[in-house]
Image (tube, helix red, strand yellow):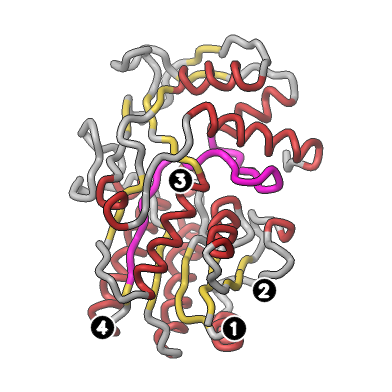
Amino acid sequence: MSWLVTGGAGYIGSHVVQALRRADMDTVVLDDLSTGFADFVPADVPFVRGTLLDAELVATTLREHEVHGVIHIAGYKYAGVSVQRPFHTYEQNVTAMLTLLSAMQQQGIDKFVFSSSAATYGTPDVDQVTEQTPTSPESPYGESKLIGEWLLRDAATAHGLLHTSLRYFNVVGSGEDRLFDASPHNLFPLVFDMLYKGRTPRINGDDYPTPDGTCVRDYVHVSDLAVSHVAAARRLDAGQEVEPVYNLGSGDGSSVREIMDTIRSVTGIDFTPEIHPRRAGDPARIVATGDLAARDLDWQMRHSLEQMVSSAWSARRAAGDDYPA
């Protein structure tokens, strides 16, 4: 019996696979490698290359690998770009999930851990986001993740699916040098790539109503995130009660200037960020509490900001010129 990790060749998914292996839980990976890397999958973990839109492949994978639960991380994750590519976003995040859930239902698989997103909240008007904060997504990406949560709710009502959704914010760091974040839209890889190429990073807006004038965001280490995915899977395996949604947040957050200062210190590269105007729609602060996940899913902030930066920078340097531009 094994857990299927969709998107297990990606940045977050590969860390979840490693955490499952450390917990002695059998794992199989399904990934189309649109953003993932085959090298991220350990040699002793079965790897199926393909898309969740291929219903026959999904059904065969579930059956042949005796899957009894799914951790669903695969998807199109670029919120900003999703505004220009709504159909693609819904196909990858909603249609694909429907195909997966249908195949699971047909084979009697009833455990599901969903990689949701803070994008379901949109721009919350609160100092600290909780699971009770109203959802108001502002992009097709955020909407698709909320629809995914609704699908799980309805599958539970109709078929008894046991499920939980993990909403997380800015995932950073690395648990191993070979596992790096290659997203062209995330702050850490953007800044590292600029430094690696001898360019100057930028800050978009330094006149926000925050302690240092720059935006405050919630940053969590990818390895801490992975631990809670495993805890959720174990809880479902044990038949223990879970909440439908958990936030994985730090509770306090860090400002963009703090991030830049820490990057300067860790890398030893002396730079002064260029200050550019605010980007439209960027809220001053988005920070979440992780109290419920701490209670149920072994969630805690095990890494300091300096450790988040240093581990991510080490993985970026290890990738060298092989890092995707």
Q: Is residue 126 above or below residue 155?
A: above
Q: CA distance from mark 3 to mark 1?
A: 33 Å
Q: Give SS at disc 2.
A: loop
Q: Which residue is mark 2?
A: 46
Q: Which residue is mark 4?
A: 158
Q: Which residue is mark 1?
A: 65
Do residues under tags 1 and 2 come within 8 Å of each other at their CB atoms?
A: yes
From which residue to which does the magenta span run?
163-186
**Measuring 68% from the left and 61% from the top, which residue is drawn there?**
41
Q: Is residue 203 above or below residue 186?
A: above
Q: Amino acid at mark 4?
A: Ala
Q: Amino acid at mark 3?
A: Ala
Q: CA distance from mark 2 to mark 3?
A: 30 Å
Q: Which mark is residue 79?
A: 3
Q: CA distance from mark 4 to mark 2?
A: 31 Å
Q: CA distance from mark 4 to mark 1?
A: 25 Å
Q: Is residue 182 magenta?
A: yes
**Measuring 61% from the left and 55% from the top, which residue is drawn there?**
10
Q: Amino acid at mark 2?
A: Pro
